[in-house]
Image: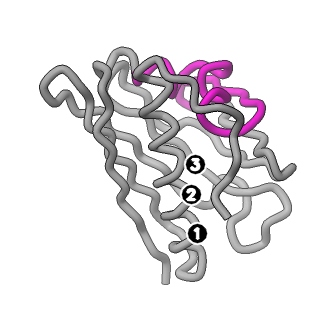
């Protein structure tokens, strides 16, 4: 049995701006992690080094400019959520002059749902800040 989460955030920037923070390694690392390797093509690398020393790895499944990115997700050396074992689907929905980001994370073990919900809620707030031109400061993962 696996669990899923859906987290949404309204961002004060158009989808074209938000999309760049999901498809550029340097921009990704401004809102999540301390380093990222993002290759936004089908089969491309998705890798983010987090401030606690853990690394998440996966690969891109689907990329539609200014509309959505879908990639697999999992942690190196994490037996319950190994690299590529779950899927993250991020939709960018134009709403007025902004973007509603709807993030759906599927295939999570039930005991991982809460921590990933807290994490994505934290990180979508950081994505909202950088997309609107605000520096969110160094990444301090939620505790």
Label total for image: 3
Pointer 3 residue = 72
Residue 73 horizontal/vertical position (percent) = 61, 51
Residue 26 horizontal/vertical position (percent) = 67, 19
- Indicate which disc residue 104 carries: none
Asked where in the image residue 99 lies, by quadrant, the reply is: top left
Residue bounds of the magenta highlight: 18-44
Residue occupying image coordinates x 61% and y 28%: 28
- Indicate which disc residue 119 carries: 2
**64 relative to 21 in the view: left or right:** left
- Indicate which disc residue 115 carries: 1
C-alpha distance separating marks 3 and 1: 17 Å
Asked where in the image residue 91 lies, by quadrant, the reply is: top left
Residue 46 horizontal/vertical position (percent) = 66, 36
Closer mark to the observer between disc 3 and disc 2: 2
Give whichever of 11, 103 is nearer the camera.
Answer: 11
Residue occupying image coordinates x 72% and y 27%: 37
Is residue 43 within the magenta segment? Answer: yes
Residue occupying image coordinates x 63% and y 38%: 32
């Amino acid at each position: 049995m696996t669990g899923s989460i859906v987290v949404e955030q309204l961002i004060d920037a158009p989808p074209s701006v938000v999309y760049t923070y999901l498809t550029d390694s340097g921009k990704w690392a401004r809102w999540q992690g301390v380093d990222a390797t993002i290759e936004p093509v089908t089969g491309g690398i998705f890798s983010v080094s987090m401030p606690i020393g853990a690394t998440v790895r996966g690969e891109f499944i689907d990329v539609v400019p200014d509309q959505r990115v879908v990639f697999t997700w999992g942690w190196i050396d994490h037996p319950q959520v190994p690299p590529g074992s779950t899927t993250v689907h991020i939709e960018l929905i134009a709403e007025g002059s902004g973007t509603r980001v709807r993030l759906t994370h599927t295939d999570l073990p039930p005991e991982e749902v809460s921590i990933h919900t807290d994490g994505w809620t934290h990180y979508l707030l950081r994505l909202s800040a950088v997309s609107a031109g605000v520096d969110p400061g160094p990444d301090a993962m939620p505790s």
